[in-house]
Image (cartoon, rainbow, N blue to C red):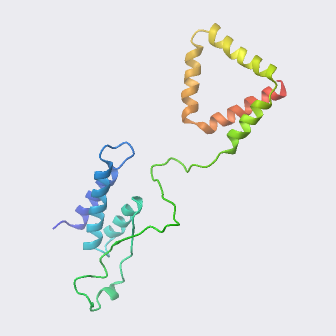
Amino acid sequence: MASADELLREAQYALQNVGPGSTDEHKYTVRAKSYALQLIQKYPHSIEAAQARDILGQLNIQIAKPASRTLARRPLANPLRSPATARPLAVPANQPKVNRFAARPTVTDNQWRTIFKRFTAVPSGKKRVFFGILLLLVVLVPFSLFFFAGLLVLYAFNLPLLKQHLLLLLGRIESGK
């Protein structure tokens, strides 16, 4: 028979191996869930059971809290089923599904719309001058292509910085400085 510490350790190990790029993500999710449920069923009032409930919470599985110790000692109408035995609860229909691997929630971003509207409002002569300067930099300055590739990588990983710099650039183009 496995102890509470061993079950918790196995559940934690399985949870650590659950990842968005893991090839065995489903297998480790099932293992983490199985070990955590075993722990909660065998030791419902232990500290490890509380940690196992946290693990199940990270897997978007809600577990009913155990009955108090005084209620667990009452004689049962059905001796085969203990009230301390935890079963997964269904997630309410109105609760949104949580993706624990998402970096941030997806929302509509009005800043991109604002940037696009401001760019289209810039006179075409100023746009031609701006793109002409960029083209001259790429053609005349050796290795400037590497600089622009580096900027592309930097902005790909930091979109708020790209928005900030685009807004500053549009402000300068609009003001004529």
User: Farthest front residue?
Assistant: 93
Q: Is residue 55 left or right of residue 155?
A: left
Residue 141 place in picture, x, y as percent: 63, 9
81 relative to 91, above or below: below
In percent of the image, x 27 and y 73: which residue is there?
41
Q: Quadrant of residue 119?
A: top right
Front position in the image: 16 or 78: 78
Quarter holding residue 170: top right
Quarter where residue 122 is shown: top right
| Relative height, residue 15 to residue 92 (above, below) | above
Vertical side of 17 occupied by 124: above or below: above
Looking at the image, residue 118 sits to the left or right of residue 12; the answer is right
Q: Is residue 151 left or right of residue 87?
A: right
Instruction: Judge by depth and name the residue closer to the eye, 84 or 43.
Output: 84
Q: Position of residue 175 (x, y in %)?
A: 84, 28
Quadrant of the drawing holding the N terminus: bottom left
Residue that appears at 58% across and 31% down: 155
Q: Position of residue 45 (x, y in %)?
A: 32, 76
Q: Quadrant of the C terminus?
A: top right
